[in-house]
Amino acid sequence: MTGRVAVAGVDEAGRGCLAGPVYAAAVILGSDIPAGLDDSKKISEPRRERLFDAICGSDAVYCVARAEVDEIDRINILQASLLAMRRAVLGLSESPGLVLVDGNQAPVLEVPVRTIVGGDASEPAIMAASILAKVARDRELRRLDALFPGYAFARHKGYGTAVHLAALERLGVSPVHRMSFAPCQRYLHAEGMAAVSGESVGAA
């Protein structure tokens, strides 16, 4: 990738969720750009999975990073998202000359940064980053679904759907819920203590 300025696209996934880490990815596309890149929200889960493998199997330089639930609760979701983005950029094996970030806020970096509202629909490197972050986070929520049955994490991926809120009403919070988020605070009641203490939350 010599002879040109390496441009990294950066995006996050899971900022609006009630549970689980927030993920971010940074991608410097190479010459072998996978066909069909798009905003991860606009494509189906099977296609995202295929594109994830295609990006990782190409000559792209990439890094996926995250900020944990305790970090989200301690520094707030915006700062945690920016922290995950910074970790993703710093984790690249090649230092970019320019970083393009989806949205209107960017992490503090030692290289030039440009924010682009709607960048995940217009910049291929950001599209690739959005796919990596989204798929990596979805895989983590499927893992958490097995660890904390009853919340249907594999189904809603941690977002505040009716199914998720009903599970919170029934079971209370789990150790992977973001307690700084109002819906989780609302459901911090006696039933939820079973999850925190490590007992099974699979039964109503």
Image (tube, rainbow, N blue to C red):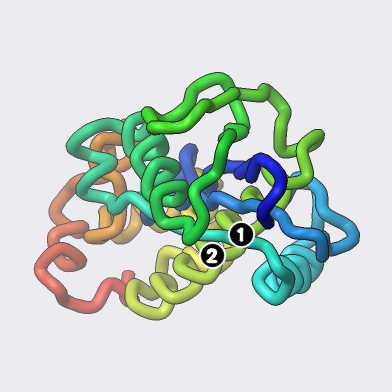
Q: How many marks?
A: 2
Q: Residue at x 47, y 66 (%)?
A: 141
Q: Quadrant of residue 61?
A: bottom right
Density class for disc 2 (Cα within 10 Å; few <14, some 14-19, many ≥20) is many
Q: Looking at the image, which is closer to me, 99 or 156?
A: 99
Q: Is residue 142 above or below residue 1?
A: below
* Amino acid identity at mark 2: Ala
Task: Residue 197: give x, y in percent of width and height.
Answer: 10, 68
Q: Is residue 89 above or below residue 100?
A: below
Of all residues, the one furthest to the left in this rendering is: 197
Q: Which element carries disc 2, helix, strand or loop?
A: helix
The residues bearing labels 1 and 2 have C-alpha atoms spaced at a distance of: 6 Å
Is any part of residue 165 visible from this angle? Answer: no
Task: Residue 53: give x, y in percent of width and height.
Answer: 70, 74
Q: Is residue 154 above or below residue 188?
A: below
Q: Quadrant of residue 103?
A: top right
Q: Residue at x 71, y 44 (%)?
A: 4
Task: Residue 189: give x, y in percent of width and height.
Answer: 17, 48
38 displayed left or right of 70: right
From the image, tell me which residue sits under label 2: 136
Is any part of residue 50 visible from this angle? Answer: yes
Q: Which element carries disc 1, helix, strand or loop?
A: helix
5 displayed left or right of 96: right
Mark 1–mark 2 CB contact (< 8 Å): yes
Q: Looking at the image, which is closer to me, 121 or 200?
A: 121
* Amino acid identity at mark 1: Leu
From the image, tell me which residue sits under label 1: 132
Q: Is residue 60 above or below residue 109?
A: below
Q: Residue at x 78, y 45 (%)?
A: 124
